[in-house]
Amino acid sequence: MGFNNVVKPYPLSGLQPIYALLINKYFIPGTRGTYIAIGSVTEPFHPLLVGKTLEYIECIYNYLGNPTQFSTKQYIDKLIAGKIYEATNGKISPLITIVTLKMHRELEPKQSTPERRLETIKT
């Protein structure tokens, strides 16, 4: 898909993806509209991306209201979890992935441990 290994925030402001979605004839805005998935291309809660991710989540909720899911393997602390909750009024679907308990260092050497991800689920 042409992606490289450099982690950097997407250059669009929070409102620019909203506009792009609204002019897309295949997108349906609203609570019964198109499902939005965050985290299918990169780790949305990587320390360099968390601010932009929160901005996008807040704009989606405030301007579109579409059902939204994020997927992550990062540890999310209480502060970030609180910001997600505040931005969405708790109306978001989190997916915290745990691929393996025994071989996580070999398969996902740069990700949070399964134990930290379980803490994220608890939070």
Image (cartoon, helix red, strand yellow):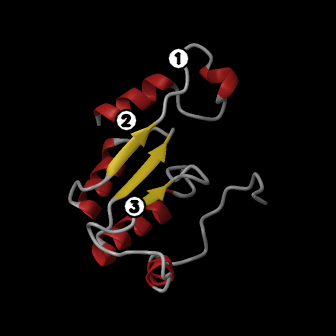
Q: Amino acid at mark 3?
A: Tyr
Q: Is residue 90 visible?
A: yes
Residue hosting label 1: 101
The image quadrant where one finds the C terminus is top left
- Marks 2 and 1 close (CB-CB < 8 Å): no
Return the residue nearer the eye: 11 or 63: 63
Q: Position of residue 88 (x, y in %)?
A: 26, 61
Estimate the spatial distance between the alpha carbons at disc 3 and disc 2, rounded to whole Å.
23 Å
Q: Mark 1 or mark 3: which comes first in sequence?
A: 3
Residue hosting label 2: 120
Q: Mark 2 or mark 1: which comes first in sequence?
A: 1
Q: Mark 3 or mark 2: which comes first in sequence?
A: 3
Return the residue nearer the eye: 110 or 30: 30
Q: Quadrant of residue 65?
A: bottom left
| Left or right side of 21 for 91 | left
Q: Quadrant of residue 18?
A: bottom left
Residue hosting label 3: 35
Tag 3: Cα neighbours inside 10 Å, few (<14), some, or many (≥20)? some
Q: Quadrant of residue 64?
A: bottom left
Give the tally of numbered discs.
3
Q: Position of residue 14 (x, y in %)?
A: 45, 76
Q: Residue furthest left?
A: 89
**Residue plotted at (24% across, 56% down):** 91
**Residue plotted at (60% across, 68% down):** 10
**Residue plotted at (49% across, 50% down):** 45
**Residue plotted at (46% across, 84% down):** 19
Q: Amino acid at mark 1?
A: Leu
Q: Position of residue 48 (x, y in %)?
A: 57, 56
Q: Residue furthest top?
A: 102
